[in-house]
């Protein structure tokens, strides 16, 4: 099937924005495209009972690494369930400033030592951690499908660390939404979202559908699944998925 020149409908594989002020709505208006939101995955937390099986004592660690808001949520949820009071001297290493600021929901931010990478990449986070690696014992709360790059770095640098699985990623049922409507584009935000597509529709054929992906691991998962990747973010001129879509749709409209 030929790829159509114009994009009229896009499926965003995330929950619908909570506010009407989302830049996605500005994008839809500007390019007259129909946006549907439907999360391809959901996150389920491990119970304190299941966490205990990992035999990890949270209070033994002096620093915690957070790569998402989910990891923050589930770390403090497990601490609360187990009645663990985290030391005020604990340091927090966050993948982005947004994740660092999210910590304010759980801690007195000014009293803690919070660090984050300069540009949101794993590389910049590891550069920050590198300055502290000899003095800290790192705890890395993660999901069951976490990328291994941070763990490999901790191991290679002989850091004292433990990886704690606190939540798991589960595929949602997306068969109905994909079978009742044909989208011109589907946008993914994690390798788990790509996996969910094929768990729901093992015989999925891309045909003329464009694919967008946010993050290098998501882009890699799209290509490893044998799909053609049309929109990739972040990029130098497009730090967000909305910016990348805007750039792409603007180019399409010139054709």
Image (cartoon, helix red, strand yellow):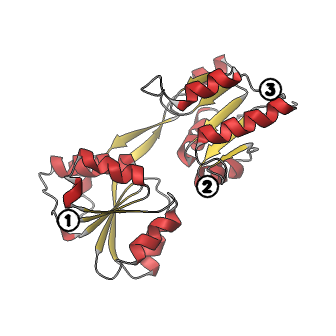
Specify whether 97 is left or right of 25.
left
> 206 or 247: nearer the eye?
247
Question: Considering only order in the chain, which callout, 3 or 2, is on the residue closer to the N terminus?
Answer: 3
Q: Is residue 15 above or below residue 103?
A: above
Quarter placement of the C terminus: top right
**Mark 2 nearby-residue class (10 Å; few <14, some 14–19, many ≥20):** some
Can you give x and y, in whole percent of width and height, for residue 219 in the image?
65, 50
Q: Which mark is residue 57?
A: 1
Could you give the CA–CA distance between mark 3 and mark 1, rounded to whole angstroms?
55 Å
Could you give the CA–CA distance between mark 1 and mark 2, rounded to whole angstroms?
33 Å
Q: Which residue is mark 2?
A: 216
Specify whether 11 is left or right of 253.
left
> 47 or 14: nearer the eye?
14
Q: Which residue is mark 3?
A: 6
Disc 1 + disc 2, Cβ < 8 Å: no
Q: Residue at x 36, y 40 (%)?
A: 44
């Amino acid at each position: 099937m030929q790829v159509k020149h114009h994009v009229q409908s896009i499926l965003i594989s995330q929950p619908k924005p909570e506010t009407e002020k989302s830049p996605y709505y500005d994008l839809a208006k500007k390019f007259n495209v129909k946006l549907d939101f439907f999360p391809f995955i959901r996150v389920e937390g491990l119970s304190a009972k299941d966490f205990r099986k990992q035999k990890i004592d949270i209070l033994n660690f002096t620093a915690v690494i957070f790569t998402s808001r989910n990891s923050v949520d589930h770390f403090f949820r497990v601490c609360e369930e187990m009645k663990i009071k985290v030391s005020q001297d604990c340091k927090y290493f966050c993948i982005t400033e947004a994740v660092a600021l999210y910590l304010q929901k759980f801690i007195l931010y000014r009293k803690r030592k919070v660090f984050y990478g300069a540009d949101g990449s794993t590389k910049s986070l590891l550069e920050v951690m590198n300055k502290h690696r000899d003095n800290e014992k790192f705890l890395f709360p993660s999901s069951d499908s976490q990328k291994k790059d941070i763990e490999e770095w901790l191991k290679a640098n002989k850091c004292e660390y433990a990886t704690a699985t606190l939540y798991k990623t589960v595929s949602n049922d997306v068969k109905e939404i994909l079978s009742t409507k044909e989208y011109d584009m589907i946008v993914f935000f994690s390798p788990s979202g790509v996996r969910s597509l094929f768990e729901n529709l093992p015989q999925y054929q891309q045909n003329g559908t464009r694919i967008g992906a946010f993050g290098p691991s998501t882009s890699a998962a799209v290509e490893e699944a044998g799909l053609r990747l049309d929109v990739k973010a972040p990029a130098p001129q497009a730090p967000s998925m909305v910016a990348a879509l805007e750039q792409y749709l603007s180019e399409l409209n010139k054709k």
